[in-house]
Amino acid sequence: MATDSDIKKSNDLMLKRKAKKRYVSIMHGGRDIDSVDALTRRCSDLFGTIATEKAGLRLICSDENVIVIRCRLAKLNEVLVAIALTDFPLLTLDISASLRRLKRRL
Amino acid sequence: MQGENSSFGCRFLAIKVQTDKKVQAFEQHRRLQGVIVFHRVDLWVRGEPEKLSSIAGQLGFSSVGSCFDGKIHENIVYRLPGVAPSAVRFPYIIVSERIDDAESADLITVANFRHVKEMIKKKAQQGLGLEFLISETRKMNGAAVAKWLVQIYDAYSFCERTGCQLILSSGANSTLEMISGRCFDAILNEIGIDPERHWQEMKKWLQTATSKRVMI
């Protein structure tokens, strides 16, 4: 039977956890850096700079016309909206919790 | 001969029932696993139909809408400006950009709902689809996009009241401009619409709209 102190402890442990992340593969029609720049700009235009920073957008790797970005799970919806509404043509191909699985599916 | 025909018919029916049961069991299994089965549709995409029908599945769409180019492809609902002169072999819907055509068309593409709301109120019939294109928002700034999202929610509540169907389409002119199913869900969530319910309603609406037309 879990006591109140156990629950408190588990809550504290939850707070110390790393934020969950998601890897998103995106097809684009330009240079990879330009695509990420356009996405970051659109995200901060739509949701504000604080939300964009919290999303933790990072370019992980890029292939010919496919890039893989990483973002926090809590802000995944905002990032997906920004991808869809960016003027620079970007097309979300897949989303995964691990880079290895995403690469396998690509 | 007659006996052979009837036995063939029985066997065909048995196979069909078996397949239906398998599909039902598969969907039931996925639901029990916590997977939500969506039948997403993007009714406006321009591009090579062969490419479209193959890429649609990858992006999470069960079917896409496109202009008719003379060839019939799987998973494509064709957009025609009027009723086909004779029975055809493909599913299609009648589309228009003029609100005056509300009585004859299945779907009307709306650019600004606030400007045409009063006209639509007078002319809209139950089952009419009001289509909004996401591609229009790409050139807008943040404030204009926010207004657009609120406008879509207004249109959604209008559709709920009047029995019309809200349709969100990508408005893509190429495959690269397409929007994936997961992004559609994110946009619907941002607007304040439950994606699961929206796609279920869309599926029903599309079935009703296409079944109205004569097909061989």
Image: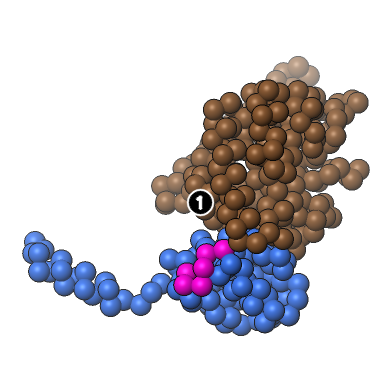
Chain colours: A blue, B brown
Q: In the rendered image of this protein, does residue B192 appear above or below residue A83?
A: above
- Left/right of residue A59 with respect to residue B70 in the rendered view: left
Name the spot of residue B130 as percent of width and height, x first: 68, 36
- Left/right of residue B20 with respect to residue B44 in the rendered view: left
- Magenta segment: does it hold A47? yes
Which residue does the numbered mark 1 point to in the structure image? B189
Badge 1 amino acid = Asn
- Magenta segment: does it hold A57? no
Q: Main SS type for the magenta part?
A: helix
Q: Quadrant of the C terminus of chain B?
A: top right
Q: Which quarter of the picture shows residue B215? A: top right
Q: Which residues are magenta?
A: A46-51
* Viewer-closest of A19 and B3: A19
Q: How many marks?
A: 1
Q: Work out whether residue B169 can be spotted.
A: yes
Q: Work out whether residue B43 can be spotted.
A: no
* Viewer-closest of B43 and B71: B43
The residue under the point 45% across, 46% down is: B31
* Viewer-closest of B60 and A53: A53
